[in-house]
Image (cartoon, rainbow, N blue to C red):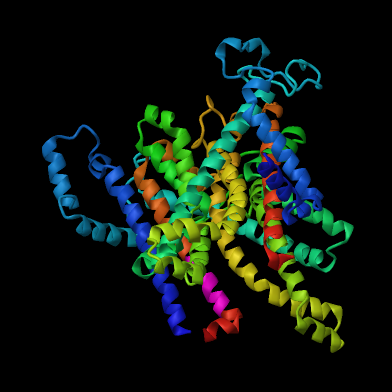
């Protein structure tokens, strides 16, 4: 019993936590992020309505303004959209999808990037040259353009019903594949340094296989910068997903992310129903902003050169 | 220096080759060139004959070579949807997008650099703190939301500007410009602001960061010790030395402006390349997709090459490497 407690205490006493407490912006960002993640994860439990259950929708309640505006209904705090769905509830569910796509896409980028980076750094030679050249070519395109093209080609090639069914995974794939290069570059550089250290040589001399050394010894030593990049990458991934969905290439209106909700609301903007798009937009900005602020702080805190 | 230039050219060629390969795959294998020309009602014999005349019975590398030959002179076939030559479509849409990107870049540099310098010189002042927070919001807010906010305020509420389209344009040869008419210039206002907000924030943060770093360098202290005026120290010494990374980033940003222009064009129904590619994806118009990829790839490669050359020109250290 004492071990987890002492580990926790050591964690709380660490330099990082102390620094965290000294940075009010980071604490605020982390708090906002935490609240949003909880709202997203617990959406089915805490959302005031069930927006994706067609039986519970009433078209009489469609396009209601927010509760504090004239004509609003107190049971729909942020108003309703053109199908009578409660905007606040769709935001909770939308954040769930936005976060899920963002996290999955970053995990995919990290997996591809870290693996290729380790392989390139450890084996060197033509494998290294091939992987890094591929990365150079890809880096001459903006991430959003690559994700846009993978997604667009997938949409154009697949039959509509198959595309409808696989959209979630296609979006994750498009964003994940578009963003691996930065992870590969970082891990490759770290691997080049680690592989010449004595502990790696000692492991090799005692007959440990390359793969084992790579994954049990070198990999953990390259993780610091990867975590920073992944945090900052999460903001970019969520935004990229929102852009793709806004363009009609990402999540469908029946299973909407924040971006897809804004797309739906965009068509009603000119008739003055601003709340249908602006509240999901506000949620998106808050989400990305808090991820960015927290990521920025993490980069400064973990990078001794910036202190 | 020559070897550096050659290496850069080599990597540009590699990028172009990969892009051409992708574009070829989309054009030849996803699209069906035979249906493209004959329509779906042609007989089997007609198809075979056309297949031979088009060289589709040749090995892949021969076909790729022919694709390259045609791409170099701008022949990307006929659009499935509009039945017009793809090149013609792209050239008719190109001016709208380039004008948008050009104006946004000018605005971004014109505002981003001065604000960045100001914030670097007074990092603790109240004004620069506010500006820094605005910039942080600026890089976190998605472009389409800025555009929608502008429409909501300027078009829906105040009814000052029209929310859609390019306004009146003037034809100069094949180029169409909105800069010469009143309604054309008005139509540019909201899309350009939408596109530029991210770039302004980005450039401002970058200039500020670099300049604060440079201000700590010894040569700045020495410049002060020589009794030079603040103006000279700040602008001629500090700013000039902090602009190097700005060049790289601005180059990359112009590339991503072309990508973000797609979003901006979707919000404002701006009749540029972005709307063209969105429609092409909607209708599975593969020749247009292939040509767009090739065009954009070429554009990015040229931008990267230009940035490298500018670097070589303004940073003497690079020439010795």
Residue depicted at x 74% and y 65%: A307
Decide whether residue B311 is among the magenta residues: yes
Res. A146 visible in picture: no
To which quarter of the image does residue A70 belong? Answer: top right
In this picture, residue B289 sits left or right of residue B110? left
Residue B55 % position (x, y) = 17, 53
In this picture, residue B14 sits left or right of residue A98? left
Question: Which residue in the rendered view is the most extreme toward the bottom?
Answer: B226
Q: In the rendered view, tell whether residue B279 sits above or below residue A305.
A: above
Quadrant of the snapshot with the N terminus of chain A: top right
Residue A229 % position (x, y) = 59, 55
Residue depicted at x 48% and y 84%: B1
- Tell me which segment is drawn in magenta: B302-312
Q: Looking at this view, is A183 or B230 the one in front?
A: A183
Res. A130 visible in picture: yes
Q: Looking at this view, is A293 or B92 the one in front?
A: A293
Residue depicted at x 67% and y 32%: A38
Q: In the rendered view, tell whether residue A162 sits above or below residue A196.
A: above
Residue B102 % position (x, y) = 60, 59
Question: Which residue in the rendered view is the most extreme toward the front?
Answer: A1
Decide whether residue B306 is among the magenta residues: yes
Residue depicted at x 83% and y 56%: B129
């Amino acid at each position: 019993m004492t071990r987890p407690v002492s580990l926790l205490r050591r964690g709380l006493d660490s330099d990082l936590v102390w620094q965290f407490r000294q940075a009010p912006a980071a604490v605020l960002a982390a708090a906002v992020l935490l609240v949003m993640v909880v709202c997203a994860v617990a959406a089915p439990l805490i959302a005031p309505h069930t927006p994706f259950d067609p039986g519970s929708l009433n078209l009489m309640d469609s396009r209601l303004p927010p509760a504090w505006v004239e004509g609003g209904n107190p049971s729909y705090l942020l108003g309703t959209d053109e199908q009578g769905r409660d905007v606040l509830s769709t935001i909770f569910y939308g954040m769930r999808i936005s976060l899920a796509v963002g996290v999955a896409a970053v995990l995919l980028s990290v997996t591809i990037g870290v693996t290729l980076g380790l392989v390139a750094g450890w084996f060197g030679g033509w494998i290294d040259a091939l992987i890094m050249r591929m990365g150079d070519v890809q880096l001459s395109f903006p991430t959003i353009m690559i994700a846009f093209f993978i997604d667009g080609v997938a949409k154009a090639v697949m039959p509509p019903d198959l595309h409808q069914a696989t959209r979630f995974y296609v979006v994750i794939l498009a964003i994940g594949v578009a963003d691996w290069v930065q992870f590969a570059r970082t891990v490759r550089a770290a691997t080049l340094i680690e592989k010449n250290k004595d502990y790696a040589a000692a492991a090799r001399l005692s007959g440990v296989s390359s793969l084992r050394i790579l994954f049990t010894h070198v990999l953990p030593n390259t993780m610091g910068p990867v975590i920073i990049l992944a945090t900052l990458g999460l903001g970019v991934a969520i935004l990229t997903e929102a852009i793709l969905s806004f363009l009609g290439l990402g999540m469908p209106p029946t299973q909407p992310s924040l971006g897809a909700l804004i797309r739906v609301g965009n068509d009603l903007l000119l008739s003055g129903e601003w709340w249908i798009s602006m509240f999901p937009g506000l949620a998106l900005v808050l989400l990305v902003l808090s991820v960015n602020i927290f990521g920025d702080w993490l980069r400064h805190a973990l990078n001794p050169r910036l202190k | 220096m020559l070897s550096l230039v050659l290496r850069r050219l080599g990597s540009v060629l590699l990028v172009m080759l990969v892009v051409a390969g992708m574009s070829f795959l989309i054009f030849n294998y996803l699209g069906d060139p035979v249906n493209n020309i004959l329509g779906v009602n042609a007989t089997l014999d007609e198809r075979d004959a056309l297949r031979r005349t088009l060289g589709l019975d040749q090995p892949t590398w021969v076909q790729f070579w022919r694709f390259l030959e045609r791409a170099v002179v701008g022949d990307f076939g006929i659009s499935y949807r509009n039945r017009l030559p793809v090149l013609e479509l792209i050239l008719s849409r190109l001016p709208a997008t380039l004008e948008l990107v050009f104006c946004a870049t000018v605005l971004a540099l014109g505002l981003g650099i001065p604000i960045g310098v100001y914030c670097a010189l007074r990092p603790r002042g109240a004004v620069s703190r506010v500006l820094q927070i605005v910039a942080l919001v600026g890089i976190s807010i998605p472009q389409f939301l800025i555009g929608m906010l502008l429409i909501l305020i300027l078009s829906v509420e105040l009814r000052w500007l029209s929310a859609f389209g390019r306004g009146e344009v003037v034809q100069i040869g094949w180029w169409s410009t909105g800069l010469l008419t009143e309604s054309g210039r008005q139509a540019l206002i909201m899309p350009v602001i939408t596109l530029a907000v991210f770039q302004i924030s980005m450039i401002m943060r970058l200039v500020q960061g670099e300049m604060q770093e440079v201000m700590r360098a010894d040569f700045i202290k020495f410049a002060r010790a020589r009794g030079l005026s603040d103006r000279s120290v700040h602008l001629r010494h500090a700013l000039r030395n902090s602009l190097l990374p700005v060049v790289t980033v601005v180059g990359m940003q112009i590339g991503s402006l072309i990508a973000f222009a797609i979003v901006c064009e979707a919000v404002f129904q701006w009749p540029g390349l972005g709307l063209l590619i969105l429609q092409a994806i909607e209708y599975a118009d593969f020749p247009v997709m292939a040509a767009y990829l090739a065009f954009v790839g070429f554009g990015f490669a040229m931008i990267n090459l230009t940035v490298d050359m500018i670097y070589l020109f303004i940073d003497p250290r690079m020439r010795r490497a």
